[in-house]
Image: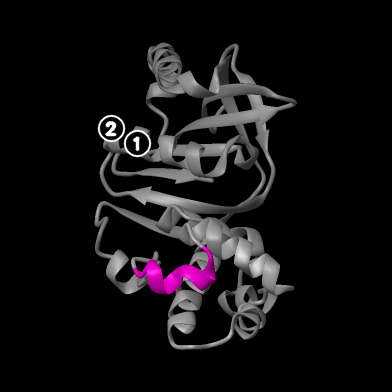
């Protein structure tokens, strides 16, 4: 697997994250499902179970049989009586690229950045209404509302989840937030569609969990970026 990641020029975390984001299934789960789909075909073609187990990387026949039953719902030896076995299809990225023309996914390197604004402590399951309230308060300040870029940032430090509304220039009574340099997956929305952004944020939370934060939203007049 390490060699696969090096082909794309990114580390394991980035490659796995992009795959998960694009397909809503982890790379590991996809590979496992494909192997067990093909294993069913091999059994029907008369191949021995111990050979199939070795072909698909299982340490023993019992471990393969257990995985096969969990996936298909019956033992390999019962496949001829249960021909409606599961088949996980090949994912074709060329077709998927046309599914969402309103957004594009790239990888960017964000350097160290210091931002200024305010925050509220939030419950991870109730971020949108609390974030909206904070944005309303911050947009009442000319220094914030007139900024070229505005940043919404979710942080999780020692189990405390905070939502920040920030800009790049300090202003009176603003609090400072430092973001360290790292690579992010960037989801860039061509249009500022709040419903679509909320939908994507919910999907990111579901797929990655809070251990992937800070999660950064960058708002400008013409587009919105979400960085994870």
Question: Could you tell me which quadrant the N terminus lies in?
Answer: bottom right
Please provide percent x and percent y for residue 136. Answer: 38, 14
Is residue 83 depicted above or below 226 in this figure? below
What kind of element bears circle 2?
helix
Please provide percent x and percent y for residue 4. Answer: 61, 77
Quick one: label 1, few (<14), some, or many (20+) residues within 10 Å? few
Q: Is residue 81 magenta?
A: yes
| Residue that appears at 50% across and 59% down | 71
Q: Main secondary structure of the magenta part?
A: helix
Is residue 84 depicted above or below 199 in this figure? below
Dots 1, 2 in contact, CB < 8 A: yes
Is any atom of residue 144 visible in this view?
yes
| Residue that appears at 57% across and 18% down | 119
Q: Is residue 28 magenta?
A: no
Name which quarter of the figure residue 15 lies in. Answer: bottom right
Q: Which residues are magenta?
A: 75-83
Answer with left or right where residue 24 lies relative to residue 164: left
Q: CA distance from mark 1 to mark 2?
A: 6 Å
Please provide percent x and percent y for residue 133. Answer: 41, 12
Is any atom of residue 18 visible in this view?
no
Mark on residue 195? 2
Is residue 195 depicted above or below 73 in this figure? above
Q: What residue is disc 1 on?
A: 199
């Amino acid at each position: 697997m390490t060699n696969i990641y090096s082909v794309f020029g990114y580390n394991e975390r980035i490659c796995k994250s992009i795959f998960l984001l694009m397909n809503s299934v982890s790379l590991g789960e996809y590979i496992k499902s494909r192997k067990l789909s093909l294993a069913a075909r091999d059994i029907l073609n008369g191949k021995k179970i111990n050979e199939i187990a070795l072909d698909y990387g299982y340490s023993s026949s019992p471990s393969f049989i257990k995985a096969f039953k969990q996936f298909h719902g019956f033992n390999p030896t019962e496949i001829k009586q249960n021909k409606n076995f599961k088949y996980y299809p090949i994912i074709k990225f060329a077709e998927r690229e046309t599914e969402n023309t309103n957004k594009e996914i790239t990888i960017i390197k964000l350097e160290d950045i210091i931002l200024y604004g305010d925050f509220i402590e939030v419950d991870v399951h109730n971020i949108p209404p609390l974030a909206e309230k904070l944005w309303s308060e911050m947009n009442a300040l000319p220094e914030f509302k007139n900024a070229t870029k505005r940043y919404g940032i979710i942080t999780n430090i020692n189990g405390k989840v905070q939502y920040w509304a920030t800009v790049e220039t300090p202003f009176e009574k603003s609090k400072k937030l430092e973001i360290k340099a790292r690579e992010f997956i960037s989801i860039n929305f061509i249009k500022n569609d709040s419903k679509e952004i909320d939908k994507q944020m919910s999907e990111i939370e579901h797929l990655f969990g809070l251990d992937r934060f800070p999660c950064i939203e960058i708002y400008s007049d013409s587009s919105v970026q979400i960085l994870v």
